[in-house]
Image (spheres, rainbow, N blue to C red):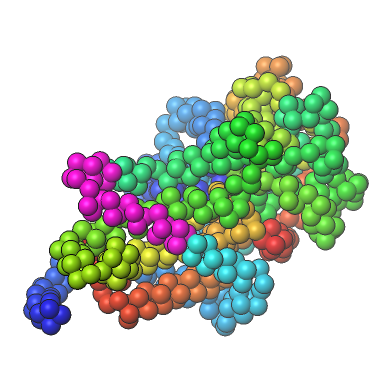
Amino acid sequence: MSVTRRTILGAASLVLARAGAGSAAGRDIVFTSWGGTTQDAQKKAWVDPFQKNSGQRVKLDGPTDYGKLKAMVESGNVSWDVVDVEGDFAVAAAKQGLLEPIDFSVVNRANLDPRFTSDHFLGSFYYSFVLGFNKAAFGGKEPKSWTDLFDTRAFPGKRTFYKWSAPGALEIALLGDGVAPDKLYPLDLPRAFKKLDTIKPEIVWWSGGAQSQQLLASGEAPLGQFWNGRVYAVQKEQSGIGLSWQQNLTAADVLVVPKGTKNKEEAMKFLAWATSAKPQADMATATNYAPINTEAAKLMAAGAAATLPDQHTESQVNLDMAYWAANREEIGKRWYEWQAK
Amino acid sequence: MTTMTLTREAAVRAPRRMAGFWPTSPALMLLTVFFVAPVLGLLLRSVLEPQPGLQNYVEVFGSTTYLRVFVNTFVVATIVTVVTLMLAFPVAWFLAVAPRRWASLLFAVILLSMWTNLLTRTYAWMVLLQRTGIINKTLMGWGLIASPLPLINNLTGVTVGMTYIMLPFMVLPLQSTIRSLDPATFRAASLCGANRLQVFTRVFLPLAVPGIGAGVLMVFVMSLGYFVTPALLGGTSNMMLAELIAQLVQSLLNWGLAGAAALILLVVSLGIYAVQFRFFGFKAAGEVE
């Protein structure tokens, strides 16, 4: 996830396109993520110190592109060694045999949040989808719940949602329609789409984090579904921006190693470092996304730790990545069909 | 006059064509290896994945969603082409007849816009067109409208953004054709009694057809496959084909279906090129003097 998403991949991927890394010995490994502020933070928190400590050089590439990843694995010419991907994709990709298994003799599994750890991926950081809003639009009233997001009478104006078929919006629709969090899965798709239909003319889609911030800050879409870190970044710049943690929806980006990489050993060492406590703490401090290492919070300044999604667990809902991975294709088809109507 | 031009062209062309072939081979090889081969690979997947057969084509033609995307793609490309032609014609004419200094200044402006990053230009339109953008705020400030006009995330936004991007591709072939016309022809027409309108419609326009043809073809075909601008300025209900293909490749990893959609787009583009070639000859089908 993060700043540039698939819409603009065409242009952005030219920037760092590189092929066939590492046929020589003592080679570099390539870490691919989504670009923008998130990858900048990953560079500072993970890559720079890792290079310094290990002497292993790490090159950065981006943005992540699932099509490219699949093409690399199929052609046997894998130039990405570690890739930051969305959780539901990782589960599906593992099933399709696109990923190397994680070597837990190198990576210490003990302190990793089990929600985001599996045999084929490790958590990168975790985030929450939250209700964000621009206070100026509602004259003192503040939306609190997902139900408010669908109440166009009390909160008029455009609302913005994540454009791509991914865990989040459908769950929000169901929660907004009164479904109990423990009854969310399997998703009642007709009901979710029906609920979304009630506000469809008012929806503006955001396809990348930067766009979501711009919509919120300008008041173009004064409320909507946002990644928590993105709302925080706007709050730092501008007053009058609020967010509600009620029923915040957690999901994680995870780190994977594409099948067939020639640098598996080095990649595992990098994974071990990136998921360890201190780098996870530094990453969380920089981004306001939560660490997936349970020891990391202790290493953070108290103020910084208090703003993370892992401090808002009382009504937190975990998006079900396994459900999504199993139904990803079918939901995707119906999502885009519904959007195009 | 016609026969003279023909023989002269034939005489000059024939040997030049053969002599000109060999220096193009590096470029052709590059295209074959890095373009034709991978494209064929993707197209092959359309009949091989998930199993051999035509199921992907059945799915594309059987789904109202995909059909709607196809129709929308052609509607958008047509609108953009027509609007671009209307805007580009006066500019091309001015470029062709204006004093050199003015023409080169205008030329620089057009080229500069082409050299500016596509994303930057598209984002600039987002800032201008959105509900809280400059245009809507100004109009509301003057009291001309009560609520913001919907200028973005719909057909209007796509048309504005794409027309702007496509303008140079229409202006350049048009102006090169117009400049090559002999002003004496129009004087002769006037002398023979044609009024201004007749000179324009019966002499100028027919002579400009090769330039119009080249510009229209270029803009229409480019618009058919356009991606970034519709994705950012359009809404989901007027999605274009390239966006659908990108979704299938990158998000849904359904390369078979993506290959089918890509093949259809390719066939249509080549078909349009063939029709143009048939009716206007090589010159109109892309050759710019």
Residue B272 in the image, given as x and y percentages of width and height: 41, 75
Left or right, A339 with respect to B157, comes to: right
Magenta span contains residue A325: no
Residue appearing at x 34%, y 57% in the figure: B89
What are the residue bounds of the magenta stretch?
B80-107
Above or below, comparing residue A322 to residue A330 in the picture: above
Which residue is at the front of the view, A68 or A140? A140
- From the viewer's side, name the closer residue of A203 and A271: A203
Residue A175 percent location from the top left of the image: 85, 46
Residue at screen point 50% across, 74% down: B264
> Quick check: can you spot residue B260?
yes
Confirm whether residue A192 shows in the render: no
In the figure, residue A25 lies in which quadrant? top left
Quarter of the rendering occupied by the C terminus of chain A:
bottom right
**A217 and A310: which one is in front?**
A217
**Which residue of the protein is positioned furthest toward the front in this rendering?**
B193
Location of residue A173 in the rendering, given as x and y in whole percent from the top left corner:
81, 49
User: Viewed as shown, does residue B101 lie left or right of A214?
Assistant: left
Residue B136's spot in the image, x, y percent?
60, 38
Image quarter hosting the N terminus of chain A: top right
Residue found 48% across the figure and 71% down from its top: B265
On the picture, is A198 further left or further right than B98?
right
Please, which residue is most extreme toward the top here?
A302
